Image (spheres, grey):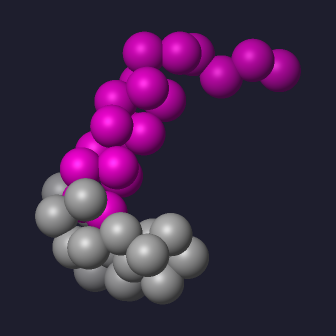
Amino acid sequence: MPSECEIQRICRETGMDRMQAIYHLRARAELLRRMPPRR
């Protein structure tokens, strides 16, 4: 679950509502898990 401050930051920056922000953060976390970080 994304943290509260992250959710609020996304809401402010993108104008998304709460549910959209949560969905967005989850999707991004999912992507980061799938792609191993490159050095």
> Among all residues in the image, which is located at the extreme front?
15
To which quarter of the image does residue 6 belong?
bottom left
Magenta-drawn segment: 21-39
Which quarter of the figure is the N terminus placed in? bottom left
Tell me, yes or no, if residue 37 can be seen here. yes
Q: Where is residue 13 in the image (x, y as percent from the top left)?
A: 55, 76
> Which is the main secondary structure of the residues drawn in magenta?
helix
To which quarter of the image does residue 20 belong?
bottom left
To which quarter of the image does residue 17 belong?
bottom left
Tell me, yes or no, if residue 9 can be seen here. no
Residue at (31%, 63%) from the top-left corner?
Answer: 21
Q: Position of residue 23 (x, y in %)?
A: 24, 50
Which quarter of the figure is the C terminus placed in? top right
Q: Where is residue 3 in the image (x, y as percent from the top left)?
A: 30, 71
- Looking at the image, residue 26 lies above or below residue 35: below
24 and 15: which is toward the camera = 15
21 and 29: which is toward the camera = 21
Q: Is 23 part of what is drawn in magenta?
A: yes
34 and 13: which is toward the camera = 13
Q: Is 29 part of what is drawn in magenta?
A: yes
- Looking at the image, residue 31 lies above or below residue 10: above
Residue at (57%, 16%) from the top-left corner?
Answer: 36
- Looking at the image, residue 20 lies above or below residue 28: below
Left or right of residue 38: residue 27: left
